Image (cartoon, rainbow, N blue to C red):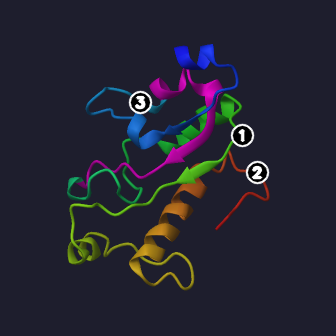
Amino acid sequence: MELFRAVPGLAMTLDVRHACKPETLGLTHADCLCEPAPCIANLHVCGIDRSRKELGDSTPPGRDAVVWEDLARDLAALGYSGPVTVELAYPSHLDTADIERAYAGIRPSMPGAEDLSRRLSAWGVEFFREKFAVLLKEGDCTK
C-alpha cells in the first residue's frame, strides 16, 4: 500500500485466489479489500474449492473458500465498477485421463459446449455471472 500511496493513479489486479488464503494466512476476502479497494482496477477470480484437494487451487467454482456473493456485495458498496476476469485452469499435476475423471460431473451449460474445456469455461462463466450479478450492468459481456 505504500507503493500505491507513493504513486498516484497506480492501480492493481486483485487476484482473489492468490490473495485469499484462509487456511494458511487467515485472510478472508474482506481482509484483502479493506485498504487496497480504491486501487483495484481489475478483479480476477477463480474457483477455490478446498473440498476437492486432488484438483488443487484451479478448480471449477463451487463449494469455495470465498463467499462470492459477499465479495460482490462488498465491492459494489465500495463503488467498484471495473472488469471481473475469470480464470479457469486445469491442475498441472494431473494427466489427461485424470483430468477427464476429475471433471466428469461438469455438464454443458450452453449449446455446443461438449469438450471438457468448453464445459468448464461455460460452467465458470455461468457461476460467476450469477454470483457477481450485483456488479454487472446491462450490456456487460455475457459469454
Q: Earlier in the sequence, mark 2 or mark 3?
A: 3
The amino acid type of the residue labelled 2 equals Lys
Between the C-alphas of marks 2 and 3, the distance is 26 Å
Mark 3 Cα within 10 Å, few/some/many (few <14, many 20+)?
A: some
In this rendering, is residue 41 above or below 33?
A: below
Please say whether residue 107 is one of the residues in the magenta stretch.
no
In this rendering, is residue 117 above or below 140?
A: below
* Residue at which label 2 appears: 137
> What range is drawn magenta here?
30-52
**Quadrant of the snapshot with the C terminus:** bottom right
Instruction: Using the rendered view, name the quadrant where residue 21 is placed.
Output: top left
The amino acid type of the residue labelled 3 equals Thr
* Residue at which label 1 appears: 81
Disc 3 element: loop
The location of residue 83, given as percent across then percent down, is 66, 47
Between the C-alphas of marks 1 and 3, the distance is 21 Å
The location of residue 105, given as percent across then percent down, is 33, 73
In this rendering, is residue 71 above or below 32?
A: below
**Mark 2 vs 1: CB contact within 8 A:** yes
Q: Which mark is residue 19?
A: none
* Residue at which label 3 appears: 28
Between the C-alphas of marks 2 and 1, the distance is 9 Å
The residue shown at (22%, 78%) is 97
Please say whether residue 45 is one of the residues in the magenta stretch.
yes
Q: Nearer the viewer, mark 1 or mark 3?
A: 1
The residue shown at (42%, 77%) is 107
The amino acid type of the residue labelled 1 equals Ser
Disc 2 element: loop
The location of residue 41, given as percent across then percent down, is 64, 37
